Amino acid sequence: MSSRTPQTPVVTTQQRVRADLDRRRRWITNVGRGLLDTTHPILVHLIPVRRCNLACRYCNEYDKISAPVPADVMKRRIDEVARLGSFSVGFSGGEPMLHPTLDGLIRHVRDRGMMAGLITNGYRLNPRRIDALNSAGLDYLQISIDNIDPDETSSKSLRVLDRRLEWLRTHATFDVNINSVLGAGVRNSEDAYAITVRARELGFSTSVGIIHDNTGALRPLSAADQEVYRRIRRLSGGIPAFLGNAFNSGAFQDNLAAGRPNAWRCRAGARYLYVDEDGIVSYCPQQRGKSGIPIDQYTKDMVRQQFRTPKPCAPLCTVTCVHRVSAPDRWRGAQTSTNHVPS
C-alpha cells in the first residue's frame, strides 16, 4: 500500500538536494566559527517533556507522568541557548514528539539561526507529521532501533517502525540517522546487523551505539556481540549530517565495545549542554545535576571554565554525541581546571 496521500506529496529529489545543500552550507559556516572560537556550545540537548510513551528497560531518562514544558518557557530557553552562541539544538526526552507545540519550537530554533534536530522513538511519525517537520525546518532526526521484534527490554523494534521508516524515505527532506544498539539488555545482537542493513537499503545514514545499563554503567560486549559490532562498523556509513564525518568516533566506540577506557578531553558543559525539563544545565544525560546551573544563569565564563575542566567520568563514558562534539578540540591544550562545578 502506498504511503502517498494528497495531503503529503512525495518529496522530489530536487527538494532533497536543495535541503541538503542548505544544511551543508550552514554546517560549514558553524564549523569554521567553532574552530576559531571555543566559547560557544556546538550541541545543546533540550528536554521539552520528560514523559515517554514507551518504557525501555535500560533507559533512565523518562517518566510516565510529567506534563510538557509550556511553549513560552521552552522558547525562552531556546533564546538563552542562542545567547550562548550555540551551533545546534537537539530535542530529546522522554519522547519529544509528545510535546504539543514541537513544530513551533523547531521553527523558533531555526529562526534564531541554529540547526534543529530531534531524537525520537519514531512511534508518532506519519506522513502528515513528517511533512510538518519539513515545514518547521527540521535538519536531522535520529531513531534508535533496539531489536527486530518487541521484547521485555524494548519496543523500539524494526517490525513496528519499518513502515514509518518508509514514510521517512518518501516524505522527509531532513537528514535521517538510524542507530542500532548493542550491549546491556539486547537479547539478540544479530538484530542490530539486520537493522543496519535495512536502514542502508532505505538510504539513511547509520550508526551503532554501545548502550549502558540502567545505572548508566558501561558493560563490555561479549565476544559474539563484538563480532556483530565489527560487521556493523564495516557497513555503517556516516553519522548525522549536522556533525559530519570529520567528527567520526570509530576508535572511541571500538574501545567501548571492548570495555576499554578512552583517553579524551570531554568538553561537556562547554561544547555540549544538556538542559532538562526544569531548565537546569548538566554535563550530559548521565551526569544530571552537574553542573546544576539554570540555563538563564549560564554564562560565557562558565563555558570557558568547563572547556578547561576534565571530567572524571570521561574514560568509561558511553555518551557518543558528547565525544563527537568534543573531538574537533582534541588538538587544543590540556584541561587544567580542578573545579567541576561552575561558580
Image (cartoon, grey):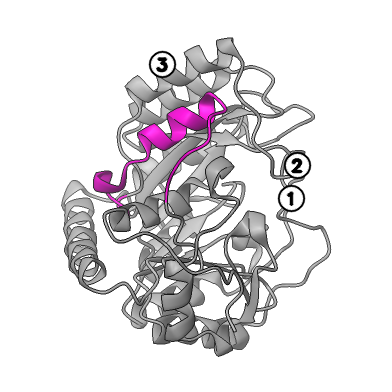
| Picture quarter with the C terminus | bottom right
Q: Magenta stretch: residue 259 in it?
A: yes
Q: Which residue is mark 2?
A: 214
Q: Magenta stretch: residue 52 in it?
A: no
Left or right of 29: which side holds 138?
right
Task: Say which element carries label 1.
Answer: loop
Q: Which residue is mark 1?
A: 60
Q: Which residue is mark 3?
A: 231
Task: Say which element carries label 3.
Answer: helix
The residue under the point 30% across, 38% down is 238
Left or right of 282: which side holds 303?
left
Chain part drawn in magenta: 241-264
Q: Are the two marked residues, 1 and 2, in contact with CB atoms closer than 8 angstroms? A: yes
Measured from the top left, where is residue 137 in percent x and y? 36, 68
Q: Are the two marked residues, 2 and 3, in contact with CB atoms closer than 8 angstroms? A: no
Which of the 4 image quadrants contains residue 294?
bottom right
Task: Tell me the crowding category of disc 1: few under 14, some 14 to 19, or many 20 or more residues within 10 angstroms, Cα based.
Answer: some
The residue under the point 52% across, 32% down is 256
Task: Tell me the crowding category of disc 3: few under 14, some 14 to 19, or many 20 or more residues within 10 angstroms, Cα based.
Answer: some
- Kind of residue at disc 1: Asn
Disc nearer the start of the sequence (3/1): 1
95 over 168 or under it: above or below: below
The residue under the point 38% across, 33% down is 251
- Kind of residue at disc 2: Asn
